[in-house]
Image (cartoon, grey):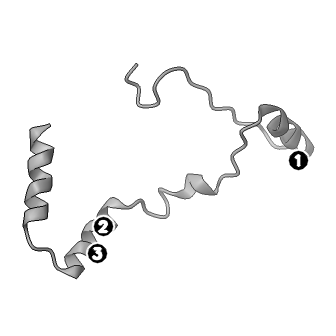
Amino acid sequence: MVLPVLAVAAVLASPVIDSQLDKLVASVLPTASEDAWLKIPWRSSLTKARAEAQESGKPLFLWMMNGNPLGST
């Protein structure tokens, strides 16, 4: 835990010009291809999603899990 804190402190202590800051921000933000899942019309109601899939003749993808989404259960 100490190393990440020291790394952040080192970055904050060094002077950053606008062009460098833009590059740093861009390196952390997700790209358009990484945000593609946001364009999927997700449904929160299984009943409505099943009816819509049946009407449109498309398959239904069901995502289920048990536990912590980070896998640290």
Q: Position of residue 16 (x, y in %)?
A: 15, 74
Does label 1 or label 2 sit earlier along the sequence?
A: 2
Binning the other alpha carbons within 10 Å of mark 2 as few (below 14), some (14 to 19) or many (20 upward) gives few
Residue 12 in the image: above or below residue 20 = above
Front-lying residue, 13 or 60 = 13
Q: Residue furthest right?
A: 55
Residue 33 in the image: above or below residue 48 = below
1 vs 2, front mark: 2
- In the picture of the structure, the residue carrying the numbered disc 3 is 22
Q: CA distance from mark 2 to mark 3?
A: 5 Å
Residue at x 59% of width, y 54% of height: 38
- In the picture of the structure, the residue carrying the numbered disc 1 is 56
The amino acid type found where label 3 is placed reads Asp
Residue 18 in the image: above or below residue 14 = below
- In the picture of the structure, the residue carrying the numbered disc 2 is 25
Quarter of the picture holding the N terminus: top left
For the residues bearing labels 2 and 3, Cβ distance under 8 angstroms: yes
The amino acid type found where label 1 is placed reads Ser
Q: Quadrant of residue 24?
A: bottom left
Identify the element where label 3 is drawn: helix
Identify the element where label 2 is drawn: helix
Q: Position of residue 39 (x, y in %)?
A: 63, 57
Residue 58 shown left or right of residue 62 in the figure? right
Front-lying residue, 65 or 6 = 6
Residue at x 23% of width, y 73% of height: 21
Q: Quadrant of residue 73?
A: top left
